[in-house]
Image: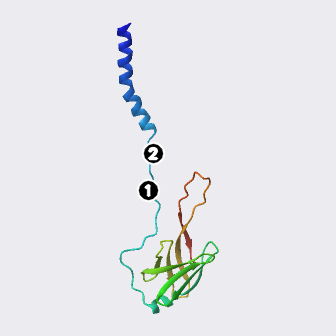
Amino acid sequence: MKKFLMFLFLLSAFSLPSAAQTAAEIDTVTITEPARQITIPSKLYKMWPEEFYKFVGAYDLSNGQVLALFDRGRRMYAKISGQDSHEIVATAENAFVALDRQLQVRIDLHDNGDVSGELLMVVPSQKQSSLDRPEDQLTRFVLR
């Protein structure tokens, strides 16, 4: 009987590592790539007030809101209807990013007077329950 109990003990001892390995394989979590974020490049585009003046105005967005670009002194701002304004800096001759990294915009002014481009904006996620940790989402809107 002692030999039989010893055999069961040894058998269970050798089966534990294989059971642990199986459990570890089942419980693996795949981490997905992080969402794209708005960043401020290390080198900004030097935009003179005269250059910015051609972008000053209101632009219709694909979601029905309006994007307005304006200046106050030597500072440039963007404001989306119903929201606070954001101080922006130029990143290219037709692109801007908010210093608070909440929006990024590209405006293409065409020779025939048409305007196109896009706005990337951080939109807060809706919290489903007290246990959820809402993460902000980056949403793209088209300029019309």
Cα separation, mark 2 vs mark 1, equals: 13 Å
Callout 1: SS? loop
Query: SS of the residue at dot 2?
Result: loop
Residue at (42, 73) in percent of width and height: 40
Considering only vertical position in the picture, is 64 above or below 16? below
According to the image, label 1 marks what residue?
A: 33
Residue 136: give x, y in percent of width and height: 53, 62
Please state which amino acid type lies under the numbered disc 2. Answer: Val
Picture colour scheme: rainbow
The residue at 45%/37% (across/down) is 26
| Side (left or right) of 35 relative to 125 | left
Q: Most extreme residue toward the top, as rendered?
A: 1
Q: Which residue is mark 2?
A: 29
In the depicted structure, whether residue 128 falls above or below residue 76: above
Residue found at x 36% / y 78%: 43
Quadrant for the C terminus in the image: bottom right
x and y, in percent, of residue 96 in the image: 47, 79
Above or below for 122 versus 110: above
Within 10 angstroms of label 2, few (less than 14), some, or many (20 or more) residues?
few
Q: Amino acid under label 1?
A: Glu
Residue ranking furthest to the bottom:
50
For the N terminus, which image quadrant?
A: top left
Residue appearing at x 50%, y 76% in the figure: 105
Quadrant assignment, res 125:
bottom right
Q: Mark 1 Cα within 10 Å, few/some/many (few <14, many 20+)? A: few
Q: Nearer the viewer, residue 94 or 22?
A: 22
Query: How far across and down, in percent of the image, does residue 7 sit?
Result: 36, 14
Which quadrant of the figure has residue 39? bottom left
